[in-house]
Image (cartoon, helix red, strand yellow):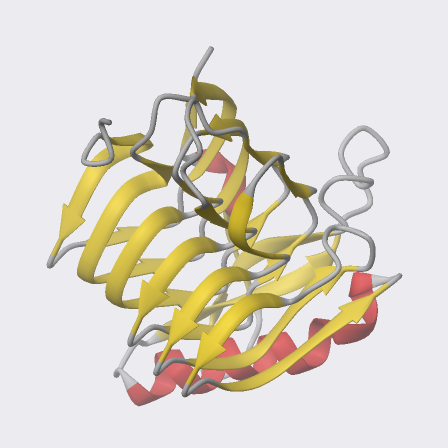
Amino acid sequence: YPSSINLGVISGQLYEGTIENCSATGRIDCRRGGKQGLVGWAANSTIIACANGTNIVGGYHVGGFAGECSTVELVGCYNYGDLTLRPFTNSNGLIGGLVGTEVLGKYYGCYNNGTVSSDNAYASGALLGYACNSALHYCVYKNGSNSNAIGQRNGVTADIGGFDDLTLAMNDMNTAIANYMSSKGYTYAYRYVVNTDPATMTKQPLVLQRVNHLSMTSETEDLGEKSVTTS
């Protein structure tokens, strides 16, 4: 059973790395196992201001940004891809809108607007499938994406919520992002703004802008400028 296969839209594995200001759309279908997401597996890494619109069907650990990760910080990221766990065998896998399974993670101002469904999951959540010794700071999800925010948890602190209208959580998420980036010494930040494009606003009610951190005035670079598409 190939549970060690790591398949990602950007990278199969990410170790001691950073991914920033990227977006991805397309489809992954890998039902024989492994870990699937924007990256398949990640450790000791940071993912900032990224959007995942990839529809993923996986067979073991599935997440919008990582199927499995350890000691990862996810900052200002949102998933609007539809995620499905459909195991090739009786895997009792893990699936979450942000991450399938993780330990020692930190999440700041992230949201999930994609559906999270499974045929036979050990744990399934709108944000995280399984989480251990982690912290979520103002992370939210669309009501109805999954019945649980976190499928199973151990030692988790969380400011989380489900909303019919995700724009209601925008200010709190922006504060979480700005506080994180200020604490790390960044001279800029990212913030969510309401999406006014009729073609994309249903799946992406909030989109990201890069802003001057001190004055919070908009710069010209928006999230969608760097993208990866799969088929």
Q: Residue furthest front?
A: 90
Q: Nearer the viewer, residue 163 or 118?
A: 118
Is residue 169 toward the left or the right of residue 110 in the image? right
Picture layout, residue 19 above or below residue 197: below
Q: Quadrant of residue 102?
A: bottom left
The quadrant of the image that shows the N terminus is top left
Which of the 4 image quadrants contains residue 114?
top right
Q: Is residue 18 left or right of residue 168?
A: left
| Residue located at (33% from left, 73% from top) | 105
In the image, residue 206 sits, relative to residue 75, either above or below, namely above
Query: Is residue 213 something that shows in the picture?
Result: no
Q: What residue is drawn where x is 31% and y is 40%?
A: 39
Question: Closest to the observer: 117 or 159?
Answer: 117
Percent x, y of residue 190: 49, 65
Q: Which residue appears at 15% of the width and 55% of the height?
A: 17
Residue at 72% x, 54% y: name it.
146
User: How far from the left and from the top, in percent, is residue 227?
Assistant: 43, 30
Residue 53: image quadrant is: top right
Q: Is residue 34 left or right of residue 21?
A: left
Left or right position of 51 against 147: left
Q: Position of residue 47 (x, y in %)?
A: 33, 57
Residue 71 screen position, x and y as percent: 23, 70
